[in-house]
Amino acid sequence: MLTGYQINRMSLFRKIISMLFLTSFSIQAQTELKVLGLSDELEKNVKNHLAGYTATDISGSLRFQMQLQQDIETALQALGYYHSETEFTLSESSGKSTLQVNVLPGKPTRIEIADIQLSGDATKDRQFSRLLRQQAPETGEVLHHGKYETLKRELRSLALRKGYFDAEFSRSTLEVIPELHQANIHLHFASGNRYKYGKVSFSGQQIRDEWMQSLIPFEPGQHYLASELGEFNQTLANTNWFSSISIEGDVEQIDDYTLPVLVKLEPRLRNSVETGIGYSDVVGPRLKVNWLKPWLNDRGHSLHSQFEISEVEQTVESAYRMPLSTAATDYYQLQVGFRNRDNLDTRSKEVNIALERHWLLGNEWYRTASVRWLYEDYIQADQDANSSLIMPGISYSRSRQSGGNMPRSADRLLLGVELSEPAWASDTPFVRLRGRAGWIGSYDRNHRFVTRLDAGAVVIDDITDIPPSLRFFAGGDNNIRGYGYETIAPVNSENELIGGRYMVAASLEYQYRVKGNWWVASFFDYGSAWNDSPDFKRGVGLGIRWGSPVGPVRLDFGYGLDSGQRNAFQIHFALGPEL
């Protein structure tokens, strides 16, 4: 006969065997982990701490439970909860184990003393006052270790950005008394003196000193600000004069909290050549060559020439740039261009000479005022004529992008107008308007969206009074894909293209990253060129994108839904910016 003591021992033995069996089984089978009892920030922080566990790490073992309890306590203590309780329940159903953790956060630890002190020049700095007002902990708040460390980091960062180079914490202590549910913070930040800019010295430059001085966005004696040095660096880069730029403080020459600035430069090569290629099954292959001479003399003058050759069109353009006092953004430019076209119903030879004045406005917009002379000798359909026009004009443009050769975000806007009047020796009076807009956006790392809108109008009674280069034609790889280059336009009685007074083309494109720099794309294009009423055309298709070191490479297979042809497919290939 078994005694009560023996029965209890056997019962305990069965429980141990049962626990070991369940533990062993949960290790062999995949165990699901459930954490209950938390919400909001507590739940989120615990999940973040447990995110490192993989499915194979999770089990019902006592060792894992102890590690899990420690991680949960650490996550809760970071938010001021030092008295949490955890209860584990291991169950098995349908061959699958579940480890359920019920968590009771307990009473939070609150701040009893919030001793935050600021000394030095920073006491008169509004940004420091705003930072402390927004982020400094207050008495009675629940202790939050992350916010405390963030405040310390923000104080150091702000001090460096604004020139408080001697700043330090004279006292930085966080005392936690768990048994009293209290915490005491003593944070004393001594900023010291704020430094000022001294003299800016250049070395290695090939441009005269007065032009270099005009690029500096601050004055000696002005308080230091890191963002101004970043602006200075970008301004120097935008000139295209230098291959290497280094801006640093001359710490050995500091005097009375004044920091001299050293700018070390290396000239860019005097010649730079870039090439681009494109293809469509109507135009055939296209070759583009850009030749840049970034500096010609010590005044920073530059010459940019562009050659573009295809079977139907050959273009040569040169632009001579003459910087003004703010050399990077304000300049005069003289442009000369020649173009020969033999495409479908257009045969023309044109000469363009333009004088332009460029300004960068304060809101990132460029303004360009110009006077252009155009001479064009042409045959368009059944019209054989020539035209000489003088056109003053003005345009506004803005381009922004981030994220490298396949930018995650970008936008481009252009608005322009040109006028022609016989009063200044033009053959024909008219007003020509142009507008372009483009946007690139991303979702996650693998999804991109590209949209474009291109529009134009000529205010004139008869479109045949101006040469073909000023009329509007649609179709092609940068316009409406699925149609041949400039094949969409009004026609005459012989079904020959004559060009339109109006044009609009819109594009919507989605891209998905397959692997690395390779993407697939789908697109829908819509638009027309017309005189009286539009006959809108639709193009759809698929494409391949490669983010090459020199920019996106695009191969598109377009189908013209309204082409009226049995074989409505077009192949388009291009290299270069998408907007």
Image (tube, rainbow, N blue to C red):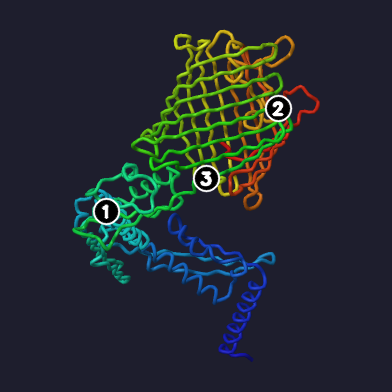
The amino acid on which the numbered mark 1 sits, given as a three-letter code, is: Leu
Question: Residue visible at 45% across and 9% down?
Answer: 423
Residue 168 in picture, x, y percent from top left: 26, 64
Please state if 345 lies on the left or on the right of 207 as rendered. Answer: right
Badge 1: residue crowd in 10 Å (few <14, some 14–19, many ≥20): some
Can you tell which of label 2 and label 1 is closer to the viewer? 2
Position of 333 relative to 24 (above/below): above
Quick one: SS at disc 1?
Answer: helix
The C terminus sits in image quarter: top right
Please state if 191 lies on the left or on the right of 477 as rendered. Answer: left
Position of 9 relative to 387 (above/below): below
Q: CA distance from mark 3 to mark 2?
A: 38 Å
Q: Which mark is residue 144?
A: none
Residue 510 in picture, x, y percent from top left: 62, 39
Q: Which mark is residue 132?
A: 1
Residue 375 in picture, x, y percent from top left: 56, 18
Can you tell which of label 3 and label 2 is closer to the viewer? 3
The amino acid on which the numbered mark 2 sits, given as a three-letter code, is: Tyr
Quick one: SS at disc 3?
Answer: loop
Can you tell which of label 1 and label 3 is closer to the viewer? 3
Badge 2: residue crowd in 10 Å (few <14, some 14–19, many ≥20): many
Observer-nearest residue: 102 or 79? 79
In the rendered structure, are the residues bearing label 1 and label 3 in contact, judged by CB atoms less than 8 Å apart?
no
Q: CA distance from mark 1 to mark 3?
A: 53 Å
The amino acid on which the numbered mark 3 sits, given as a three-letter code, is: Asn
User: Reading the chain from its start, which is encountered first: label 2 or label 1?
Assistant: 1
Q: Residue furthest right?
A: 566
Find disc 2 in the rendering and name its residue: 483
The reply to whether residue 119 is visible in this rendering is no
Q: Which quarter of the picture shows residue 321?
A: top left
